[in-house]
Image (spheres, helix red, strand yellow):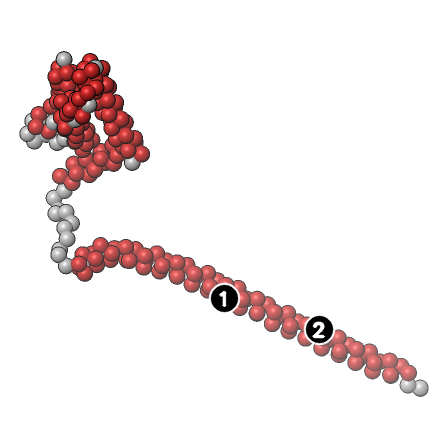
C-alpha cells in the first residue's frame, strides 16, 4: 500500500513532466520560456518526491511506523501533497510579483523577431574601451544634442531680453529728451514773461 501510494504521487509528476518535457516536442519546435520554467518546476518536484521516498520517511520514524503503519502512510501522503502545493504556490507568487510570464513572453518575441534580422547582432569585441565607446557614444551624442538645444533656446531668450532692455533704454532716452525740451521751453517762456512784466512796469 505504501509503495502504491508513493508510486501514484511520483507517477502524476512523471506524467506531467513527460507532457511538458522538451524531449516530447518535435524537433525544430520552439518551446516558450514559460513552459520551460514550468517543466523545471515539475522536474524539481519529481526529484524532491524521489529523494523523500516513503521508505526514507519510515526509516526516520520506525517506531511510529511499526505502531501505526496506515497512519504513517496518510501522514506521508499529506506531507508530500502539502509540500508540493506550497512550493507551487510560492513559485506562482514569485512569477506574479516579478511579472515573469510577461517578461519571458516578451523575451520569446524578441528572439523570434531577431531571427528575421539579416545584420549580425552586437557582440563584444574583446576590447573594453571599444565596447564601452560603442555603447556609450550614442547616449553622449544624444545628451550633447539635448544640451545644444537647451543652449540655443537660452541664447534666443537672452537675445530677446537684451533687445527688450535696449528698447527700454531708447524709450527712456527719448523721454529724457522730451523732458529737457519741455524744461527749456518753460524756462524760455518764464524769461519772456519776466521781460514783458519789466517792460510794462517802465514809466512812460
Q: Picture coordinates of residue 196 (x, y %)? A: 84, 80
Of 158 and 139, nearer the camera is 139
Asked whether 29 or 199 is in front, the reply is 29
Residue lying at 16% horizontally and 36% vertically, measured from the top left:
112
User: What SS does tag 2 mark?
Assistant: helix
Query: Is residue 81 at least partly visible in the picture?
Result: no
Residue 106: quarter of image:
top left
Looking at the rendered image, the quarter that the N terminus falls into is top left
Question: Seen in the image, is 143 located left or right of residue 185?
Answer: left
Vertically, is 202 above or below 114? below
Q: Which mark is residue 182?
A: 2
Of all residues, the one furthest to the left in this rendering is 27
Rendered location of residue 174, percent (x, y): 61, 70
Marks 2/1: CA distance?
30 Å
Q: Residue at x 14, y 31 (%)?
A: 31
Residue under label 1, please give it. Answer: 162
Residue depicted at x 14% and y 50%: 123
Which quadrant: the C terminus? bottom right
Amino acid at each position: 500500500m505504501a509503495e502504491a501510494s508513493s508510486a501514484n504521487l511520483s507517477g502524476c509528476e512523471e506524467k506531467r513532466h513527460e507532457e511538458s518535457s522538451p524531449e516530447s516536442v518535435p524537433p525544430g519546435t520552439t518551446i516558450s520560456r514559460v513552459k520551460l520554467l514550468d517543466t523545471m518546476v515539475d522536474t524539481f518536484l519529481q526529484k524532491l518526491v524521489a529523494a523523500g521516498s516513503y521508505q526514507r520517511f519510515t526509516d526516520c520514524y520506525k517506531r511510529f511506523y511499526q505502531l501505526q503503519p496506515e497512519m504513517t502512510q496518510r501522514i506521508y501522503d499529506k506531507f508530500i501533497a502539502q509540500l508540493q502545493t506550497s512550493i507551487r504556490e510560492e513559485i506562482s507568487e514569485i512569477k506574479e510579483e516579478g511579472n515573469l510570464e510577461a517578461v519571458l513572453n516578451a523575451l520569446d518575441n524578441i528572439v523570434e523577431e531577431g531571427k528575421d534580422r539579416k545584420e549580425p547582432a552586437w557582440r563584444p569585441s574583446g576590447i573594453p574601451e571599444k565596447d564601452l565607446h560603442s555603447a556609450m557614444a550614442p547616449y553622449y551624442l544624444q545628451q550633447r544634442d539635448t544640451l545644444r538645444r537647451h543652449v540655443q533656446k537660452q541664447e534666443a531668450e537672452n537675445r530677446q531680453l537684451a533687445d527688450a532692455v535696449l528698447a527700454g533704454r531708447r524709450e527712456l532716452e527719448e523721454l529724457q529728451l522730451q523732458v529737457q525740451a519741455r524744461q527749456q521751453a518753460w524756462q524760455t517762456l518764464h524769461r519772456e514773461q519776466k521781460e514783458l512784466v519789466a517792460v510794462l512796469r517802465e514809466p512812460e
